[in-house]
Amino acid sequence: MNIVQLYDDAVGLLKNLISTPSFSKEEEATAGIIEQFLSSKNIPSKRLLNNVWAVNKYYDAVKPTLLLNSHHDTVKPNPQYTKDPFTPIVEDGKLFGLGSNDAGGCLVSLIAAFLYFYDKKNLHYNILLTATAEEEISGTNGIEKLLNMQQQGSPFNKIIVAIVGEPTLMNLAIAEKGLLVLDAEAHGKSGHAAREEGENAIYKAMKDIEWFSTYRFPKISTTLGPVKMSVTSICTENKAHNVVPAVCNFVVDIRITDEYTHEEIMQIISQHVQSTIQPRSMRLRSSKIDKTHPLVQAGISLGKKTYGSPTTSDAALIHAPVLKCGPGDSARSHSADEFIYLDEIKNGIETYIKILEQIV
């Protein structure tokens, strides 16, 4: 297939996806659209829940697998939308619509690249395409569900490198911060506010919050910089103005670099705070790919820049080196009147193909 045909098909598919609501956990319809699209190209696909996947025509179980992954779920539309988020509108070279930039443009561009290589013989890698669900909520029924399939001969057992499609202006995110969310609880003793009674749990929480706001982890990542900790909410169940609260809860958002594991971060925190700490999940790990990897070097040879990404994606769940790269701009994600430039999709398809041609 030529680039023009691939581009036309990709834009048509993206318009169809935009027209179909696909909030996280509600992606049944868009999964069906992707299945139908691949079927129209005579490409057999498989589906697990709302995840769709396919392999190249001459798949060889002996060869290693290169994964092409992006997601088809979206957040709910920003309340400041002035356009219908489910109507694909083209104006001034922009395609507007919910999920157009994050990550519809990436997904359809990766699908186009997969089509380009689908029936080519004698590839060095198998190519595995996945269009996955629940990325926006880091859910367990998305890419993780596919990766946990343990059937003999499964292409998911042979993945040695991956491209995750997220809007990066086609630059090369060679590392990504992991995420650790903590629920913290400071304990005091209830008493009457008018008398010298009780131990104020808010004051105890404030001491720990001060530590979270000022502590600096000594190891700095060359690609991702320092670990970042932010206290993002605080509350007590106490509603009365004259009662000293016995319990104060707060939440900590921690963006972890490749210099630390989640376990190491937890150990350091436990040595410095008095509040009880409970992690919500230890799944979302920092990811990286070496700058010398042929996939990265292929992108660099095309003039693309490398950087470390502060945001979390499906890359956190893939236990192999991951390059995050895709058309669109992360700054537009989740914004009102979300859009992607049509030229970005065309460039994305061409760039994916040029990168892959150098290694597969």
Image (spheres, helix red, strand yellow):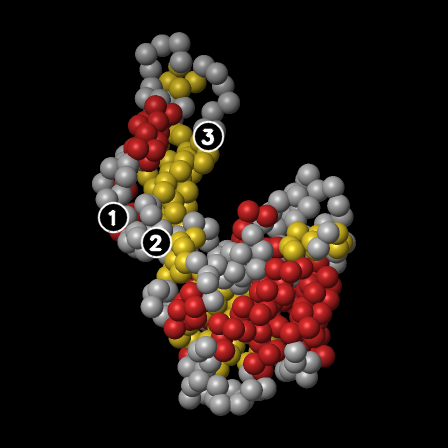
10 Å crowding of disc 3: few (<14), some (14-19), many (20+): few
Residue tagged 1:
219
**Which residue was labeled with disc 2?**
223
How many labels were placed on the picture? 3
Q: State the SS at label 2.
A: loop
Q: Residue at x 72, y 79 (%)?
A: 40
**Residue type at numbered disc 1:** Lys
Q: Position of residue 64 (x, y in %)?
A: 42, 81
Tell me which amino acid carries mark 2: Thr
For marks 3 and 1, the one nearer the N-term is 1
Q: Amino acid at mark 3?
A: Cys
- Tag 3 and tag 2, C-beta contact below 8 Å: no
Camera-nearest residue between 250 and 260: 260
Mark in front: 3 vs 2: 2
Q: Gap between marks 3 and 1, in whole Å?
A: 32 Å
Q: Which mark is residue 298?
A: none
Task: Say above or below: 206 vs 4.
Answer: above
**In this orientation, does residue 133 appear?**
no
Snapshot quadrant of residue 205: top left
Quarter of the figure with the N terminus = bottom right
Q: Which numbered dot is residue 235?
A: 3
Spot occupied by residue 207 in the image (x, y as percentages of width and height): 31, 28
